[in-house]
Image: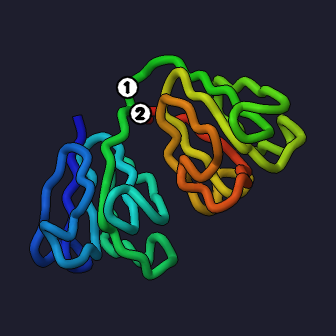
Amino acid sequence: MGKIIFYEDRNFSGRCFECGSDCADLTCHLSRCRSIRVESGGFMIYEKPNYCGSQFYLRRGEYPDFQQWTGEDESVCSCRLVPTEPGSFNMRLYERIEFGGEVMDLVDDCPSVMDRFHINDIFSCNVTDGHWLFYEHPDYRGRMYLIRPGEYKRFSEWGGRTARVGSIRRIMDH
């Protein structure tokens, strides 16, 4: 279960919209979003409708000024509930599109893809267990991408602009 509340203005003021599941278009409910409160669960929020654009993972907590927190002047137009239940994690990474090239298995967090696998780019992946975050840079920095169970034949399928993946983290309830 998850619960997120979006507010039109900073510091949790103005009109609000409460959500407990995926929402492909928040603009149907609010004209803008300046602050967010996550009361339970974890959510991926997106700058554009239909889960497109820049992504940010939010766990339980308060975000009184969204633009200040992200460091960017981006909007929030859709969200996706991310399960954080305990369980196993398993992913296969590939150095080429459509599951080609070297195969690398991952079952835990990876703060540096380069240090661990000696590559800079992940072109495709297959997730059998768990929800993951890909980060653009090592040490869980930069743009992030939600990776759910399923097959990703090329990096554009998870929203990546390039195949560059610097670090990978499991989404767990902490």
Q: What is the x, y in percent for residue 58?
A: 39, 53
Of 109 and 55, the residue lying toward us: 55
Q: CA distance from mark 2 to mark 1?
A: 7 Å
Relative vertical location of residue 25 with respect to residue 44 in this rendering, above or below: below
* Badge 2 element: loop
Q: Which residue is mark 1?
A: 85
* Residue type of the residue flagged with mark 1: Glu
Q: Nearer the viewer, mark 2 or mark 1?
A: 1
What's the colour scheme? rainbow
Q: Alpha-carbon neighbours of circle 2 within 10 Å: few (<14), some, or many (≥20)?
A: few
* Badge 1 element: loop
Of 73 and 94, the residue lying toward us: 94
Q: Is residue 156 left or right of residue 116?
A: left
Q: Which residue is mark 2?
A: 173
- Quadrant position of the C terminus in the picture: top left
Q: What is the x, y in percent for residue 85?
A: 37, 25
Q: Alpha-carbon neighbours of circle 1 within 10 Å: few (<14), some, or many (≥20)?
A: few
Is residue 69 visible in the rendered image? The answer is yes
> What numbered label is drawn on residue 127?
none
Relative vertical location of residue 160 with respect to residue 10 in this rendering, above or below: above
- Quadrant position of the N terminus in the picture: top left
Is residue 171 visible in the rendered image? The answer is no
Q: Is residue 155 left or right of residue 16?
A: right
* Residue type of the residue flagged with mark 2: Asp
Q: Residue at x 42, y 60 (%)?
A: 52
Q: Residue at x 30, y 60 (%)?
A: 78
Q: Are marks 2 and 1 in contact (CB under 8 Å)?
A: yes
Say whether disc 2 or disc 1 marks the residue closer to the N-terminus: 1
Q: What is the x, y in percent for residue 84?
A: 39, 32
Q: Residue at x 24, y 62 (%)?
A: 25
Q: Is residue 62 left or right of residue 115?
A: left
